[in-house]
């Protein structure tokens, strides 16, 4: 069945700086928390790092050619904060700004709209040394960084994303300890999450001032869920999981503040001991809830929640193992129907003016076969059913008008190193060679057919 999405729908691919750029110390770049974290023993599978990654910093023209071959409308990428402000604040590194200026100019020359994400988890280590996202002063540093970048690129960039997946930056990095900076502390996670949201809210007006007429939003990841049964304990666990994983971030972004049931639950569980969260100050709610022009949603999977599992994402399938049918190699269940359901819920509950799927994709390790091609049919199947789910949501009246496949390239997959491959383009991590996969050709044909 052909995939048909409305006229004007934006088709794109997405990447992030630390996962693809490499050039970890080039041209005045400072050290980020990921540059430090990957050097800690036992943090990264295979002790791999992103110091070279896909070497996009030197091969970006080749990568734009690949994008042009796809026929995409838009490219979502992130800025490495430490290329622009090596110490997180202070002196601007003009060489870093110039790199992104050249990238933006060449994208525009190729007819591709740049979508800039300001933060994709690579906090400057200098700021981490002063408390990182647990320190409210980091909010001010982020706003200055947003001001510097938007002042430099705002005459050409018209689509801005402040924060990518604040849940992941806060909880994976400060509670689970599997992302930089590698902490395991509830207070740190909740405080970091609040400051990430506050930095978003304060950066929006700064970006708009520097880039008049542009659109500004935030990219939130989600984990839709359903209870394992109708038992009261399972229903309660699913409700708590939804608050922990979704509502704690969605509600504040849309001006509702933190959900009261979660405020009460976290206090009851000893996450803090005050009536209101201790990191929240007067006025924060209004600043976080600043109106946005679009909401980005990153979707990969959904979960079934049983009693006792209300603050975990375990699926029972370890990442990298041979996945059973219906799972990706990340161990995530393939559940496209949950995407349409969640999009409908977001539309009905929060009513964002527009929704863009800012990430969606799957990890499958298919490599070159005897004919030199990468036959990744499982990825094609995954993308197809999720695009069909987007269509279902649109038919229900949900204002989805863009989709970014994750990812253009096989890249550095955080704590899993190079063991997971999400790309439409296969990357030889030893040589940097790029080979378009069957999914690259398929996605390009879908874009072409929709234009026709």
Image (tube, rainbow, N blue to C red):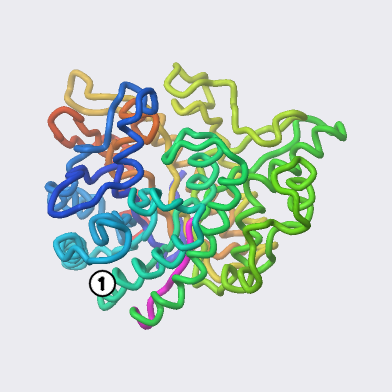
Q: Quadrant of residue 437?
A: top left
Instruction: Indicate the quadrant where residue 77 lies.
Output: bottom left
Q: Position of residue 331 (x, y in %)?
A: 50, 26
Q: For the point 20% across and 55% down, which residue is it?
A: 68
Q: Which residues are magenta?
A: 211-219
- Asked whether 212 falls inside the magenta stretch, the response is yes
Viewer-side residue, 218 vs 14: 218
Residue 377 drawn above or below residue 386? above
Residue beneath label 1, please? 153
Q: Is residue 301 above or below residue 123?
A: above
- Tell me if I can see residue 385 in this picture: no
Which residue is at a point 34% across and 56% down the rendered structure image?
76
Using residue 292 as the reference point, say whether residue 441 is left or right of it: left
Task: Based on the picture, tell me whether residue 78 belongs to the magenta stretch.
Answer: no
Q: Quadrant of residue 452?
A: bottom left
Image mark count = 1
Left or right: 149 in relation to 201:
left
Q: At which x and y percent is residue 220?
A: 52, 54
Q: Is residue 139 visible?
A: yes
- As displayed, is residue 157 above or below residue 224? below
């Amino acid at each position: 069945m052909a995939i048909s999405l409305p006229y004007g729908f934006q088709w794109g691919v997405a990447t992030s700086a630390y996962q693809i750029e490499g050039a970890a110390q080039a041209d005045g770049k400072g050290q980020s928390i990921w540059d430090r974290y990957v050097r800690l023993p036992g943090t990264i599978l295979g002790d791999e790092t992103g110091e070279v990654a896909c070497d996009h910093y030197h091969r970006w023209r080749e990568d734009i050619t690949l994008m042009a071959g796809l026929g995409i409308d838009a490219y979502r990428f992130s800025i490495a904060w430490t290329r622009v402000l090596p110490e997180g604040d202070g002196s601007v590194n003009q060489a870093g700004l110039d790199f992104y200026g050249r990238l933006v100019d060449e994208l525009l020359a190729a007819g591709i709209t740049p979508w800039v994400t300001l933060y994709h988890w690579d906090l400057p280590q200098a700021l981490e040394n002063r408390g990182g996202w647990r320190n409210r002063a980091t909010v001010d540093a982020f706003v200055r960084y947003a001001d510097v970048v938007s002042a430099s690129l705002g005459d050409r960039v018209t689509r801005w994303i402040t924060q990518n997946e604040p849940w992941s930056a806060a909880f994976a990095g400060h509670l689970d300890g599997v992302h930089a900076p590698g902490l395991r502390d509830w207070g740190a996670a909740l405080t970091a999450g609040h400051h990430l949201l506050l930095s978003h809210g304060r950066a929006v007006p700064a970006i708009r001032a520097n880039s008049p007429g542009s659109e500004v939003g935030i990219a939130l990841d989600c984990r839709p869920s359903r209870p394992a049964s109708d038992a009261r304990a399972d229903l309660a666990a699913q409700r708590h999981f939804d608050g922990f994983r979704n509502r704690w971030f969605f509600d504040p972004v849309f001006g509702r503040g933190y959900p009261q049931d979660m405020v009460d639950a976290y206090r009851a569980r000893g996450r803090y001991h005050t009536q209101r969260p201790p990191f929240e100050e007067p006025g924060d709610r209004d600043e976080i809830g600043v109106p946005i022009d679009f909401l980005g949603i990153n979707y990969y999977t959904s979960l079934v929640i049983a009693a006792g599992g209300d603050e975990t994402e375990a699926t029972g399938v370890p990442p990298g193992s041979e996945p059973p049918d219906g799972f990706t190699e990340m161990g995530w269940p393939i559940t496209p129907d949950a995407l349409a359901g969640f999009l409908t819920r977001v539309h009905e509950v929060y009513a964002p003016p527009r929704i863009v799927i800012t990430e969606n994709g799957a990890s499958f390790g298919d490599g070159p076969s005897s004919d030199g091609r990468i036959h990744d049919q499982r990825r094609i199947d995954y993308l197809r059913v999720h695009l069909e789910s987007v269509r279902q949501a649109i038919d229900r009246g949900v204002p989805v008008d863009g989709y970014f496949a994750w990812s253009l390239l096989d890249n550095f997959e955080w704590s899993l190193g190079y063991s997971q491959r999400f790309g439409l383009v296969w990357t030889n991590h030893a040589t940097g060679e790029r080979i378009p996969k069957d999914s690259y050709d398929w996605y390009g044909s879908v874009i072409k057919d929709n234009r026709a």
